[in-house]
Amino acid sequence: MTLPILQTQRLLLSLLTLEDVPTFATYRNDPEIARYQYWYPVTEEAVRDLVEQHHRLPFGTQDQWFQFGIRLQADRTLIGDIGIHFLDSKFEIAEIGYAISPLYQKQGYAVESVRAMLNYCFTSTPLIKIHATCDSRNTLSMHLLEKVGFTQQLIRPNAIFLRGEWSTEVDYAFTREQSRKNP
């Protein structure tokens, strides 16, 4: 399966390119973004490796993240990324993650991107369930997940020790059945 280009009213979600590496590394290393990300610090070399991997592996390879760049349609500016991580060999369960540059937050771009990715996954792949894990202090992300229809599944106090702090993780899920109710 090849990586698609997804289009929304304002955005394009497409495969990251080598030209995206500096911008991606810059916003992913912003302290407010990095605070809730497991992949930190982000080096340009690691991002280049990720981009090159996307060009080698087929979309849907088990246990691999596939990051789409989130771009403004008007000028193709990279404003964030959204990833899908395929967790099982049957291609039925995945995890989703996203990051938006602070310059473009609170404008609905993340909601638009997550909705587009869910729509694609449930109409064009065999996925039946998509998970998301969120740091409980990241209330904006929790609100976004709930707004698009994810259901809270589990709260794991002190689940991970991340950058000198214990983090409580909140697990969410969205199913194919929910996608039919929330198109």
Image (cartoon, rainbow, N blue to C red):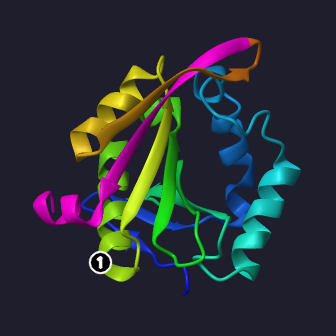
- Residue range highlighted in magenta: 165-183
Residue at x 78% of width, y 71% of height? 52
The amino acid beneath tag 1 is: Thr
Q: Is residue 79 visible?
A: no
For this view, does 56 lie left or right of residue 178?
right
Residue at x 44% of width, y 59% of height? 75
Which is more toward the observer, 142 or 74?
142
Q: Indicate the quadrant containing the C terminus: top left, top right, bottom left or bottom right.
A: bottom left
Q: Is residue 121 visible?
A: yes
> Residue 176: x and y, percent?
27, 66
Q: Which residue is mark 1?
A: 123
Which is more toward the observer, 71 or 93?
93
Counting other residues with Cα less than 10 Å from the Cα at mark 1, is it few (<14), some (14-19), or many (20 or more)? Answer: few
Q: Is residue 180 rendered magenta in the image?
A: yes
> Residue 90: x and y, percent?
53, 79
For this view, does 74 lie left or right of residue 25?
left
Q: Give the quadrant of residue 30.
A: top right
Residue at x 55% of width, y 85% of height? 2
Q: Residue furthest right?
A: 45
Determine the secondary structure under disc 1: helix
